[in-house]
Image: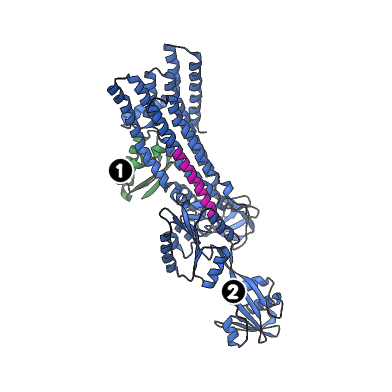
Chain colours: A blue, B green
Amino acid sequence: MSKSEKSQLIRILIAAAIFTAGILLKIEGVWKFIIFLSAYLIVGGDILWKAIKNIARGQIFDENFLMTVASIGAFFLTEYAEGVAVMLFYQVGELFQSSAVSKSRRSISDLMDIRPDYANIMRGDALVQVDPEEVQVGDIIIVKPGERIPLDGVVEEGYSALDTSALTGESVPREVGMGDSVISGCINQNGKLSIRVSREFDQSTVAKILEMVENSSDKKAKSENFITRFARYYTPTVVIAAAILALVPPLITGQPFDVWIVRALTFLVISCPCALVISVPLSFFGGIGGASKSGVLVKGSNYLEALAKTEIVVFDKTGTLTKGNFVVSEVHPVNMSSDELIKLAAYAEDYSSHPIASSIKKAYGKPVDSSQIKDIEEIAGHGVKAFIGGKEVLAGNAKLMKLKQISYEDAASAGTVVYIAVDGKYAGYIRIEDEIKPDSAQAISDLKAAGIKQTIMLTGDSDAVGRKVASALNLDEVYTELLPADKVEQMEKLMEQKSGKGMLAFVGDGINDAPVLARADIGIAMGGLGSDAAIEAADIVIMTDETSKISTAIQISKKTLRIVRQNIVFSLAVKAFVLILGATGYASMWAAIFADVGVSVIAILNAIRALNVKKFNKVS
Amino acid sequence: MKKTMKLQNLDCANCAAKIENAVSKLDGVDSVKVNFMWQKMTLETPDDQFDTILESVKKTAKKIEPDLVILT
C-alpha cells in the first residue's frame, strides 16, 4: 500500500468510527450535526477541496463535484448520516479501486520481471558490472549461474541449462553450449557462460517483449472504447436528469421540493462512471498479463477481444504444424536388415551436406568409418555412387534407379524417397519426411473443442506431402503447392467464408509469410523467441513453438471477454435499476451508494479474475 | 517526434480517458495515448514543436486532474 493510500485508509477508519458513534449515540440537535460534520470533513475534506478547485477551472461533471453536491445536499435536508455515508463509501470504493489496480499492475510487472539489472563485462583484468544499455554488439559478457542473461548473443564458452520460463511459460530448461544463440531474459541455472553480444539492449528480446506488453493496453478493444464513450455521455445525462427531477415534478404537481431533491441526489450518487471505466481495461490488462505468463504475447486488447470470435484458423505447414526438419520416417529393406540399409545409405551420403543426407546420418547415429568408402561419384540430379567395403552402392532417387536399369518398387507417396541398390541389385528405400510436431494433433482437436469452425492448412509443399499431414492432423481443408503470392490470394478467398462478426486467424512462423500474417484478422506467429520477423509482423506472438498455445490463447481470450461482458451488463443493469427506483422514490440513498461503490468493488474483483489463467496451461 | 512519459498521481481511469480526449484536440498533437494501467502518456507531435505543445498538454491535463505530474 502506498503512503497516500495508507493515510486515506486511516482517515476512512477514523471517520467510520465517529460515524458509527454518531448513529449509536442517538444524539439530537446541534451536537449530532457537529459529530457528523467532523466525520464528513475528515473523510471527504480532500474531495471538497478538489471540487472547489475544479469548479474554478470549469470542470463540473467531475466526480468530486458530484459527490460533493450529493453529500452537501443530504446535509441540507438534515440527512446527516446519508451525507457522511456518501463520502465514506465513495472513498472506500476509491481506495479499493486504486489498490486493486496497483496490485494487478504489480503482479503483471512481477511476471514480466525479465528486465536485467546489469551485465558483467571484462574491463582489463577485472570483471565489472555495467548497465546493459552500455554494452555494445561484439562485447563479451559473463553470465554466472543464477544470473539473468542481460543481452541476446551467442555462447563463446561454457555449457549450461537455461530457465526460459519467464519468457515462454515452459518449465523444462534449455541446454546450451558453445555456438548456441541465447536470448536475454533467460536465467542461467548452473554453468558460467561467456556470451558474445549480438544485439544492443534496445533491440534485445527483453526490451521488445517489455515494450509490447506495456504498449498492449494502448490498442483498445471495442468494448473498452464503448465504455469510455458511454461514460462521456452517461455522467452529464444523469446529472441533467437529476436537475430535471429536482425541479420539474414539484413545479408541476406542487409537491414539496425536498422529496424530489432527495431523489435527485440519489441520481448524483450513481452518476459516477469510474468503476465501470476501470473494470473493462483492468480485465483486458489481466487477460493480456495472464497470457504473457503462459508464453503468449498479445499486442493489444483489440486482438485479445478478436481472438474470442475466431471461426477459421489457417495454418502454415512447415515450422508451424511440422518441425521444419527432416527425419527418416520409414526404412524398407529388401533382403537385408533395416540397420544395414541405413548404414549403407549413411556411408554413401557421408560426404554430402544436403539436409536429406544429414537426416540419414542422424538416423544411423554412429560414426562413419570413412576408410571403408572409396570412389565416391556424385551423379547430379540423381544421387551418389560409392564403393563401401568393396561393394558398389547406389543411393538416390527413382531417376538413378532407372538410369542404372535397376528394377525397384515405386514408393513415391509422401516425403522424399532415397532408393538404394547394392552391386546392381535393388536393396530397398528410405523415406525422409518433415516431422509433425508432437502437440499438433492435440492442438487441432483442442481448437475444434474450443468452437473453431474450420481448420485449414496452406503450404508450398507438394500435394502428396500436404495431404498426408492434413489427414494425420484431421484438418478440414488443405491447399497445396502454393507460391507465397498464392497464399495471400487464398487467404482473401478464405476471408470471405467467415460470417460477419467472425474472425480469421493465420498461424505461421513469421518466415516468408509476413504478408499473409498481415492480411489475416489476427496474425499469430509461432516460435517468437529469436525471430524478429515474427515479433514485428504478428498481432500475437507465441514464444515457444507449441501449436497447442493457440487454443490456450483462445480460451484466455474467451474468459476475459466473458468477464468484460459480465461487468458491463451487471454494472449497467444495477445502475439502471437503482436509477428507476430512485426516480420513483423506492430507492434510498443507501441503495444508490451500493449501486455506486458496491458495484465497482464487485466489478473490480471480477476483473482481477482475468489474471488467473493457470487452468489453461496444460502440463506438457 | 514521439515520446513516452511517466505520469504521477493519475488516480482514475475516467480522468485518463478525459485527458486523452482533451489532449488529442490540442493544436499540433498528432497522436496521444494515455495508458492508465501503466501510468504513461505517449505523445506525438511535429519535431520542432514538441516542447511548446508539451506545455499546453501539461496545462490541459492539470485542468482535469490537478495533482497530475507529467515526468519528462
Secondary structure at badge 2 equals helix
Kind of residue at badge 1: Leu
Quarter of the image where one finds residue A333: bottom right
Q: Which residue is mark 1?
A: B26
> Mark 2 belongs to which subunit?
A
User: Chief secondary structure of the magenta span?
Assistant: helix
Kind of residue at badge 2: Ile
**Could you say which disc has been placed on residue A356 in the image?**
2
Let me know if residue A606 is in the magenta part: no
Secondary structure at badge 1 equals loop
Front residue of A427/A457: it is A457
Per the model, the C-alpha gap separating discs 2 and 1 is 63 Å
- Seen in the image, is A234 located left or right of residue A136? left
Please report the residue visible at 43 percent of the width from the left and 68 percent of the height from the top: A486
- Seen in the image, is A45 located left or right of residue A407? left
> In the rendered structure, are the residues bearing label 2 and label 1 in contact, judged by CB atoms less than 8 Å apart?
no
Instruction: Report the span colored magenta.
Output: A548-569
Please report the residue visible at 46 percent of the width from the left and 55 percent of the height from the top: A539
Neighbour tally class for label 2: few under 14, some 14-19, many 20 plus, Cα within 10 Å:
many
> Quadrant where the C terminus of chain B lies?
top left
> Mark 1 belongs to which subunit?
B
Quarter of the image where one finds residue A403: bottom right
